């Protein structure tokens, strides 16, 4: 069975909610085990146990929260060991133009440096789900679809 971890930082609860909806989408498959965890509760040493790693953050100054960046910085000791695994990212912000896409792309850049496989979406939020404030129905659907798409891809790899 393949394993997915969804790691998030959330101060207001919006990013945490998104993580839950992504997990819902991925959990609809029998061939993947999904774990959702806050960044502060995640042991970086367990990272290599996962076939799919998804990270989410609120947007601070156009980028990810420091807690998630710190976790990514600590993954340098696994450089080369995540090659070929599936990765994904999602973000929330307070307003339109608040930096959601730059946050998602910053996370994806780190995953790509690890050699991870990143799948875009031609139909929805292209880089990964984004929310303006509290997730609405559109965001919930995008998150569920993203989780399902990542689970399918992970099953193929």
Image: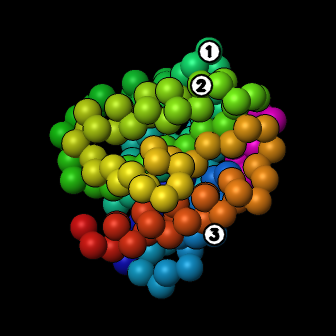
Comparing labels 1 and 2, the label whose residue is closer to the camera: 2
Q: Which residue is mark 3?
A: 24
Q: Is residue 27 above or below residue 116?
A: below
The answer to which image quadrant residue 10 occupies is top right
Residue 76 lies, with reference to residue 112, above or below; the image says above
Quadrant in which the N terminus appears = bottom left
Residue shown at the point (49%, 81%) measured from the top left: 29
Magenta range: 11-17
On-image quarter of the C terminus: bottom left
The figure's colour scheme reads rainbow
| Farthest-out residue, bottom | 30
User: Badge 1 local density, few (<14 within 10 Å), some, or many (20+)?
Assistant: few
Q: Residues within 10 Å of mark 2 (few under 14, many from 20)?
A: many
Q: Earlier in the sequence, mark 1 or mark 3?
A: 3
Question: Horizontal placement of 154 versus 57: left or right?
Answer: left
Which residue in the protein does label 2 denote? 99
Residue indicated by mark 1: 61
C-alpha separation, residue under disc 1 versus residue under disc 3: 29 Å
Answer whether residue 41 is visible to the viewer in this image: no
In terms of secondary structure, where does tag 2 sit?
A: loop
State if disc 2 and disc 1 touch (CB < 8 Å): yes
Which residue is at a point 34% across and 66% down the rendered structure image?
154
Looking at the rendered image, the disc whose residue lies closer to the viewer, 1 or 3, is 1
Is 142 or 21 nearer to us in this picture?
142
Q: Position of residue 101 (x, y in %)?
A: 52, 33
Q: Are marks 3 and 2 in contact (CB under 8 Å)?
A: no
Q: Position of residue 65 (x, y in %)?
A: 60, 25
Q: State which tag comes first along the sequence, 3 or 2.
A: 3
Classify 137 as above or below 33.
above
- Residue shown at 55%/44% (left/top)? 90
């Amino acid at each position: 069975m393949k394993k997915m971890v969804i790691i998030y930082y959330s101060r207001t609860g919006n990013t945490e909610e998104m993580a839950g909806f992504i997990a819902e989408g991925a959990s609809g498959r029998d061939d993947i085990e999904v774990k959702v965890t806050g960044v502060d509760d995640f042991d970086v040493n367990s990272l290599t146990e996962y076939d799919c790693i998804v990270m989410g953050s609120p947007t601070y100054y156009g980028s990810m929260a420091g807690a998630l960046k710190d976790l990514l910085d600590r993954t340098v000791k696994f450089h080369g060991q995540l090659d070929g695994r599936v990765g994904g990212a999602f973000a929330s912000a307070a307003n339109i133009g608040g930096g959601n896409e730059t946050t998602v792309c910053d996370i994806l850049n780190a995953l790509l440096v690890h050699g991870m496989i990143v799948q875009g979406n031609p139909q929805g939020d292209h880089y990964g789900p984004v929310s303006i404030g509290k997730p609405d129905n559109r965001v919930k659907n995008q998150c569920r679809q993203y989780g399902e798409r990542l689970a399918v891809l992970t099953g193929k790899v």
